[in-house]
Image: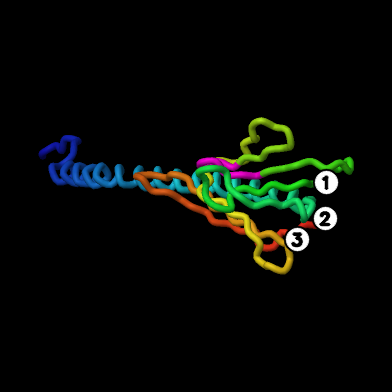
Amino acid sequence: MVKKRPGYTLMELMLVVAILGVLTLGAPQLFTRVYQFVRLTMARAEIQKNAREALSNVNRELRQAVATSVVIDQVSGQPPHSRITFDYYKSDGTVEQMSYYQRGRQLFQARQGAAEGRLVADSLRYLAFSYPRTDDDTIISLSVTFEKDTYEGGTKALQMAVEKVRIMN
């Protein structure tokens, strides 16, 4: 009678090596895809946050503007129509001058008398203010595009617009 000794056959070892080889070849691609997904998701979340915050701030204060004081122009070297300056009513009834403008890839807010504006958002690609109707200067259109780098030279962009911000004063 022949006793069987415990162990693995050559076929079992070859099968394990083949499975490990397939997993080793697929793992880097899986990690790369997970990395790309995470970078894209983070970029999307950041630009959505920036866009919502920027549009909300501009929209809220622009509604309190004095319609006859609105000036749309640009900071030197920046895109056309990328700065808006206006007088607005504060909660205590006084009037203060406010300005929103693009400088490079950043959006700034400057209050009357401030030497330098406050950073509102970064990753800004494009900002434009315009009058959608020539017969009504109490309606202003605002368009912003935010862009964030993702991976391998790619970017994720988000374009948002507020058509018809009605100036109440």
The amino acid type of the residue labelled 2 equals Asn
Coordinates of residue 32 in the picture (x, y in percent): 34, 44
Q: Which mark is residue 89?
A: 1
Confirm whether the magenta stretch covers residue 149. no
Q: Residue at x 70, y 32 (%)?
A: 114
Kindly check if marks 1 and 2 are in contact, taking CB atoms under 8 A apart as contact.
yes
Coordinates of residue 12 in the picture (x, y in percent): 18, 44
The amino acid type of the residue labelled 1 equals Tyr
Judged left or right of residue 124, residue 16 is left
Q: Residue at x 69, y 49 (%)?
A: 58
Q: Report the residue that reaches farthest toward the top.
A: 115
Task: Give the CA distance from mark 3 to mark 1.
Answer: 15 Å
The range drawn in magenta is: 100-107
Q: Report the residue that reaches farthest toward the right.
A: 92
For mark 3, what is the residue? 138
Task: Give the CA distance from mark 3 to mark 2.
Answer: 8 Å
Instruction: Decide which of tag 3 and tag 2 comes sooner along the chain.
Output: 3
